[in-house]
Image (cartoon, rainbow, N blue to C red):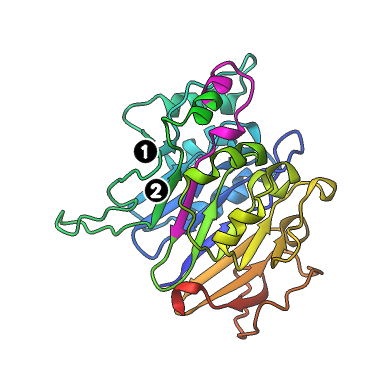
Amino acid sequence: MSVIIKSFAVSDENGEAGDMFYIKHASSNFTIIDCCMVEENQEVIMDEITEAASGKDITRFISTHPDEDHICGLRYLDEVIGLLNFYCVENKAKKNDPSESFTHYCTLRDDKKKHYYVYKGCKRKWMNDNDENDGKNYGSSGINFLWPDTSNEDFQKALSQAKEGKAYNNLSPIFTYSLKGNIEVMWMGDIEHDFLEKIKDQVNWPEVDVLFAPHHGRDSGKVSSDVLEKLKPQIIVIGEAPSKYLNYYSGYNTITQNSAGDIVFDCGGDKVHVYVAKDNYGYDTSFLSDENAENSAYGNYLGSFTPKGAK
């Protein structure tokens, strides 16, 4: 069974570029990362997620931070699938004029039976710590958190800003998904460039195959060259933000989501096959090989690459 990683091309009710992903694991795990749905697309997205998660025993939701473009539609998502495993950093973020989505975020965040607070190096059964003797053997999801260090002074300042209702981006954790013998992917939420520069020496940066550029690919979330030299990403996915705000990461292979639409990575064997929703994607794809992996269920086949784990 292959693993499917999907990045939705979505915007919130104000037209701001949003984030929403899912990982359909080869084990009995299913992971959703962030939520950005509006009334016009929420039924279509949730129909797909419900089908993709069918047969999975463990569904987790990872919330990077409570800005509207990362939590829009959260209440509807919870109503449809019933969230029992809500992952976020421990925080007391508040807003003077909270939306329905933010109010629901706080409900899940503060529910002791549903929340799990993430931090650097945290371990959790079936997230990254599989107990094969428990009689269930759901398998590890391969998710590992590299940040935050909750004792870090700069992170403590980010927590204070969120508690005062001033800013939320730098609550974002840094985490990876690893598939043995295949892909390694990294997310950073909306972590900002200036903040990343302050804490970069506190993070153990692994080599990755795919990096989802923070802050939707905006220049304000640019990952510096010295961090990229450690990550050595084969592909950087630049998000749904307007072109005038984007950093195009010159010198690296990229896929630009505002031109590609939804993006699917089909990970199996020693290859990763890449699909996009739009059939007229016009950027350079010469870094991908043609493995004749057309699959209309995933979109338009863009090409394939060999992940580092398979080499």
Give the image location of residue 260, x and y in percent: 74, 62
Give yes or no for contact between labels 2 and 1 (Cβ–Cβ under 8 Å).
yes
Residue under the image location 70 percent in, 63 percent down: 255
Q: Quadrant of residue 151?
A: top left
Q: Is residue 310 above or below residue 146?
A: below
Q: Is residue 122 left or right of residue 2?
A: left
Mark 2 burial class by Cα count in 10 Å: few <14, some 14-19, many 20+? some
Residue for point 61% across, 34% down: 169
Q: Amino acid at mark 1?
A: Leu
Where 39 falls versus 264 (above or below)?
above
Query: How far apart, in angstroms, are the residues tagged by discs 2 and 1?
Result: 8 Å
Q: Amino acid at mark 2?
A: Thr
Question: Helix or strand or loop: what does disc 2 sit on?
Answer: strand
- Which is nearer the N-term, disc 2 or disc 1? 2
Q: Is residue 90 visible?
A: yes
Q: Which residue is mark 1?
A: 84
* Direction from residue 226 to residue 78 in the image, left or right: left
State the mark number for residue 127: none
Q: In the displayed image of the protein, which residue is found farthest to the right?
A: 244
Residue 96: x and y in percent read 63, 14
Q: What range of the chain is rendered magenta?
A: 159-177
Q: Which mark is residue 59?
A: 2
Q: Residue at x 54, y 18 (%)?
A: 163
72 and 51: which is toward the camera: 72
